[in-house]
Structure formats: C-alpha cells, structure tokens
C-alpha cells in the first residue's frame, strides 16, 4: 500500500485496487496503534478511529490536499504510481 504522506507521527496510505473499484475514493490514516479510513469527497471518517487531535489534523490536511488525493486515487485505480503529497506543517 503506497505511502502518500507522513506528518506528526501520522502515516497516510492508499490501497491499490486496479480494475476493482468497489469503494468510494478513500485513504487510510495510521497513528500509533490506531487506524481510520477517510472518504475523500466529502472528507469524513468512514471507519476506524483516531484520537480527536489526530483526526482533526488528518481532516485539515485532507481539505488542503483534496484534489491531490483524488488524483492519486485515479492513478492507483489505473495501475499508475501515486505521487507523494506534502505533509501538514
């Protein structure tokens, strides 16, 4: 699963589903032992949990990079390589 970004101990990844698009565009956020899945449009948590602070950071980051997230989703669904996305600073 490609890593798209990493900031404040949070790792953002997106699964490759070539030819198997059976989910809405989404990404996975990992922080310590927690995992959450976020929809991209709209940006919202769809499953799992993160502590409140980390969830807010991921949501803020995703709002800034929503177009890049959607572009990476499309790339991965067609078998292309994802592009890194700048971290939250």
Image: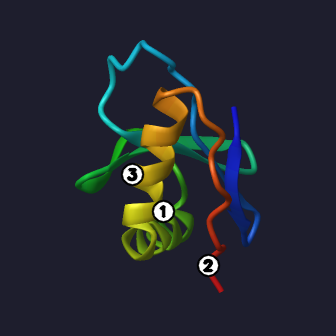
Image depth: mark 2 or mark 1 in front:
2
Cα gap from disc 2 to disc 1, whole angstroms:
13 Å
Q: Is residue 79 left or right of residue 23?
A: right
At mark 2, the secondary structure is loop
Instruction: State the residue lying farthest toward the bottom.
Output: 89
Image depth: mark 3 or mark 2 in front:
3
* Label 3 Cα crowd, 10 Å radius (few <14 / some 14-19 / many 20+): some
Query: What's the mark number on residue 70?
Result: 3
* Label 2 Cα crowd, 10 Å radius (few <14 / some 14-19 / many 20+): some
Task: Report which residue position mark 1 lands on.
Answer: 55
* Label 1 Cα crowd, 10 Å radius (few <14 / some 14-19 / many 20+): some
Instruction: State the residue lying farthest toward the left.
Output: 42
Image depth: mark 3 or mark 1 in front:
3
Query: What's the mark number on residue 88?
Result: 2
Q: Mark 3 or mark 2, which has the lower sequence index? A: 3
Residue at horizontal 33 percent and vertical 24 percent from the top: 23
Cα gap from disc 3 to disc 1, whole angstroms:
19 Å
């Amino acid at each position: 699963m490609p890593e798209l970004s990493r900031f404040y101990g949070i790792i953002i990844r997106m699964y490759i589903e070539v030819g198997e698009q059976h989910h809405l565009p989404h990404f996975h956020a990992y922080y310590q032992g927690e995992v959450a899945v976020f929809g991209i449009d709209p940006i919202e948590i769809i499953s799992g949990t993160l502590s409140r602070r980390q969830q807010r950071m991921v949501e803020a980051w995703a709002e800034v990079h929503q177009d890049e997230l959607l572009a990476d989703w499309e790339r991965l669904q067609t078998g292309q390589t994802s592009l890194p996305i700048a971290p939250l600073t």
